[in-house]
Image: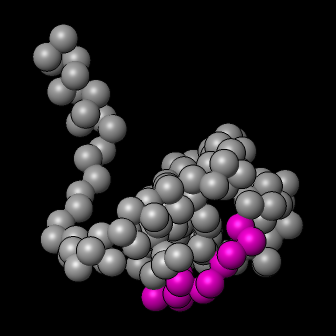
Amino acid sequence: MGIGPVEYMVLSFPGNKFKGEVAPALGELVDAGTIRILDLAFVHKDEAGDVVAVELEDEGSDILNAFNAITMDRDGLINDDDLALIGESLDVNSSAAILVWEDVWATRLADAIANAGGELVDIQRIPRDIVQAAIDFNA
């Protein structure tokens, strides 16, 4: 089997108010075989505007330990330039988590498309807020 589609996201936590609900939700997706975490990193911007990139191995908090339990396949896909760029875009006194994952659920489909000589021409993700607004508007 090949690799399924790979996606990334940047989650911002203004005021560094990260409560830890994300790690268990991701863990459920990993345990179910829906996704495979490929890389995960964190960036902090302090009140002075200084940016610090934090690799999972460098941090010992309970929150990061929870993430560490689900990130067995880190491949170094997030580089220092990515972390610097994301860190600079943060508001002061905030943090971000950067996550790269494989959509394991789509691996079989991706293989079938490739084996059939097909090519993916376009794929887009529609943010849930936009979909919810459209559903609400049409209700």
24 w.r.t. 90: above or below:
above
14 w.r.t. 56: above or below:
above
**Occupied quadrant, residue 54:** bottom right
Residue closer to the observer: 109 or 18: 109
Magenta stretch in the rendered image: 71-81
Q: Quadrant of the C terminus?
A: top left
* Residue at 30% across, 44% down: 127
Q: Residue furthest top?
A: 139
Q: Is residue 113 visible?
A: yes
30 w.r.t. 41: above or below:
above
Q: Picture coordinates of residue 23 (x, y %)? A: 69, 50
Residue closer to the observer: 2 or 48: 2
Residue closer to the observer: 76 or 101: 101
Q: In the rendered structure, does residue 93 fall within the stretch colored magenta?
A: no
**Occupied quadrant, residue 6:** bottom left
* Residue at 45% across, 81% down: 82
* Residue at 74% across, 71% down: 72
Left or right of 120 on screen, residue 60 = right
Q: Picture coordinates of residue 48 (x, y %)? A: 56, 68
Q: Main secondary structure of the magenta part?
A: loop
Q: Is residue 20 visible?
A: no
Q: Residue furthest front?
A: 116
19 w.r.t. 125: above or below:
above
* Residue at 22% across, 17% down: 136
Residue closer to the observer: 32 or 83: 32
